[in-house]
Image: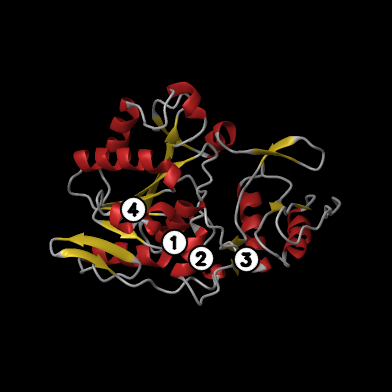
Amino acid sequence: MKVALLNPTPSDLYSPCIRSLTALLKREGHEVRQIFLPADTYAHLHVNQGFVMQMGDAMVDELAGLVADVDFVGISFMTAMFDVAVQATRAIQKARPDVPIAWGGFHPSTMPKQALEFVDMVCVGEGETALVELVSRMDDGKDFTDVRNFWFRTRSGIVSNPHRPLVSDLDSLPYQDFDFDDDWAWTPDQRHLQRIRWADYVRDFVPRYPDRNLDLRAAYKTMITRGCPHKCSYCGVAFHHSLYEGERYLRRRSVEHMLGEIKAVTRARPRVRNPETRGRGTDRGLPRLALRSAAAVDRPARRRDRGRGHLGREATVPRR
């Protein structure tokens, strides 16, 4: 099955949500096109003098063309990207009224009834295993309206299925997808969509961080934990804590799994240097990961952690 996954995203195109979904769908044999849409909710205010972020007509037309050959569209977004998500949804519905569209992410998860005013299905909570089951059933021509984690708008009303348990073993998930097999993002002037490769990503999008010599270098971002331990009232994480009450919400990847990703990306992308590890909460495995990853790729390691459990020092491994 050919799937298009869209993410209105800030300028670094990090998007761990759809990159994880893409990797899992590919592992199950599906084709995936990743489309990143501009949703810089701060810079555009100085240009457009308004509080509604909208894509230009040319970009909307190109987006419609990119979904002309797909069988399913998924759109993941946070509340700040709602305007762009609605605009993209309406453009796709106009161009492809036959294609099913699902919403997911923090905003649809917290407001599924509102989401169903725009689309016919919405994923509530984490979506990896739920989306794979949904797409596989569609591909096989089977009924999918009882897939857990999904809400559906049907002729007889709203179907709200129960949610499934969290993925407790993060090592069971593949590494995030940075293959650039079929990735699209905006041009520097934000007027058109273009296919991007790794070189384009590094040149136009990838964030720069200071290395141990304070030189700015391209950075590879990844997550070693999932689920914040806190329940701040202004954050969507508080809703997820209540959704998964009784389960362990903060989960960690093993050092070995994280090390495997660092090795894979540094082999495939030699320009990625000075591996840096980031996490949430009291990540006891971070110092060990920093040292082992640096030794594995023969580069200095540095750990930053501004959350609880801050080390207050750098761990370095000299080059051999």
Q: CA distance from mark 4 to mark 1?
A: 18 Å
Q: Nearer the viewer, mark 3 or mark 4?
A: 4
Q: CA distance from mark 2 to mark 4?
A: 21 Å
What count of labels does the image hold?
Answer: 4
For the point 70% across and 56% down, the residue is 307
Amino acid type at mark 4: Trp
Taking 89 as reference, is 227 left or right?
A: right
Task: Tell which circle, 3 or 4, labels the residue nearer the N-terminal end.
Answer: 4
Q: Secondary structure at mark 2?
A: loop
Look at mark 3 in the image and give the residue it sits on. 257
SS assignment at label 1 = helix
Tell me: 49 left or right of 92. Answer: right
Mark 2 or mark 4, which has the lower sequence index?
4
Badge 3 crowding class, 10 Å Cα cut-off, few under 14, some 14 to 19, many 20 or more, is: some
How many angstroms separate mark 2 from mark 1 (CA)?
7 Å
132 to 117, vertically: above or below: below
Marked residue nearer the N-terminal end (3 or 1): 1
Q: Are marks 2 and 1 in contact (CB under 8 Å)?
A: yes
